Image (tube, rainbow, N blue to C red):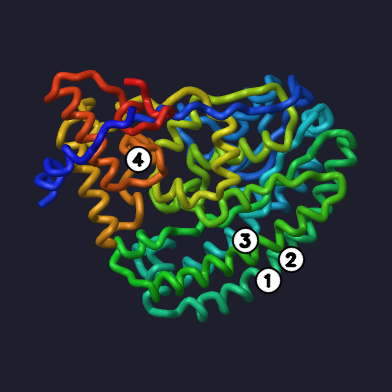
Amino acid sequence: MKYPIKRCFALLAAMAAGSLTAAALPAETASAAEQSSLLIMGDSIASGYGLKNDEMSYADYLREFTGGTVTNLAVPGYTTFDLISQLDDAKNAEAIKSADIICISIGANDLLKPTRDYFNDMREEGETAMQLLQRLASEHKAEKFISGLTGVLREPRNQAVDNYPVIAEKLRKLNPNARIMMQTIYNPYELPLRYFYANHHDDSDYQDYTLFTKYVAGNLAQLNKAMGKLESFEVADVSAAFAGDGWVFCKILSEQDVHPNALGHALIGAVIMDKLSGVKKTFPTILPLLGQIDYSDYLRMNSKSRTSLMNYTEGQLTGKFGDANSDNQILIDDAQAVLNLYTDQMAFKSIYGEGVTYAGFSQIDVNLDNSVSVEDAQFILTYYVENHISGGSVTWADITGNPKAPKE
């Protein structure tokens, strides 16, 4: 039955005057890639640079997914020229010839290195690259900056485009039969609007910064387009998976680092696994990584990317349903916290869900309608009154009338 909430509303009004129990979605795959020999080649992204010892790289996900072996020849800093030299090195021939699947991340450094040199010429003493970009945006010099960078990048970009067919020819000569996947290059400079507000910038600064990110995306698109033209190669579209939410999947917001974070590696792995056929496999590491991100970012996330990640999740996030302040109790304070969040959102004091993790949101969305509202606060208060004041024993399913809510 559904419990009435009117008798609790007065108490809630007087006050005002996690955990997630999401079941993993099944991953449906066949068995063609099982026990494959995988070869990883390319740059620092492919090498797993910057991950902690207990964090999985996308190569780790692929190894577990296929149950096969992985050889990683990736080297941080490698450009398309470096990869060509590596393919010409006889000591690598056997690893290339014996691979069933070859995954390649290459091209970003062809543009990143000259861009970094250009940054260095414009930086003030002690200024990071991100601080430089924010300063130029606030000074409305983005167009001038882009105009200068265009001349710097034209030649290395065109050379990288020309190098992709060379790489393809050399790889196919060494291994005519392997599945070869080129990973498109994502834009690492995307930032949320809230970051600019938090650093005392305004909408016009954000718009100027957006000019730069669009320019970066345009240059990367030319490299990604060149990858798509390679005959007998497959494209793992990492760029599309990251698009619009770069700060969620790389370290640009947390560390001013362009490399993927642990969730980014999980997503790269998911993009590649979606293209492979292999044994059904889920991973206990992915759902907790999703649970740590802001719910506003979870909502923004490309729905295809979110679904792809969820297809490989395993287990449940632990915590207590209705426990807004994560003290492992359901009290009046929890209803108050939910009400405060709701009223802040209604007053436009925060972006929807900002400051609340996906796991935390899933604890307080007790009616499972994918929003935080007064009704959630009312239901939490009802739960408290019925179970702690009235001495009853009712479940969340009873109170909300939603059979999918926990039976506790």
Horizontal and vertical percent position of residue 23: 49, 27
Using the numbered discs, state the Cα–Cα distance from disc 2 to disc 4 in whole angstroms.
Answer: 46 Å
| Quadrant the N terminus occupies | top left
Question: With 300 as the anchor, is 72 left or right in this view?
Answer: right
Q: Are the two marked residues, 4 and 3, in contact with CB atoms closer than 8 angstroms?
A: no
Category of crowding for the residue at label 1, using alpha-carbon neighbours closer than 10 angstroms: few (below 14), some (14–19), many (at least 20): few
Q: Are the two marked residues, 1 and 2, in contact with CB atoms closer than 8 angstroms?
A: yes
Up the image or down, 303 lies above or below 404; here it is below
Q: Are the two marked residues, 3 and 1, in contact with CB atoms closer than 8 angstroms?
A: no
Q: Earlier in the sequence, mark 4 or mark 1?
A: 1
User: Which disc, if any, is residue 158?
Assistant: 2
Q: Earlier in the sequence, mark 3 or mark 1?
A: 3
Q: Which SS class for mark 2?
A: helix
Pair 2/4: label in front = 4
Q: Earlier in the sequence, mark 2 or mark 3?
A: 3
Using the numbered discs, state the Cα–Cα distance from disc 1 to disc 2 in whole angstroms.
Answer: 6 Å
User: Which disc, if any, is residue 154?
Assistant: 1
Using the numbered discs, state the Cα–Cα distance from disc 4 to disc 3 in whole angstroms.
Answer: 39 Å
Residue beneath disc 4? 361
Residue type (three-letter) at the residue carrying disc 2: Asn
Q: Which SS class for mark 1?
A: helix
Residue type (three-letter) at the residue carrying disc 1: Arg
Residue type (three-letter) at the residue carrying disc 3: Leu
Up the image or down, 57 lies above or below 203; here it is above
Q: Which SS class for mark 4?
A: helix
Q: Are the two marked residues, 2 and 3, in contact with CB atoms closer than 8 angstroms?
A: no
Closer to us: 164 or 241 = 241
User: Which disc, if any, is residue 111?
Assistant: 3
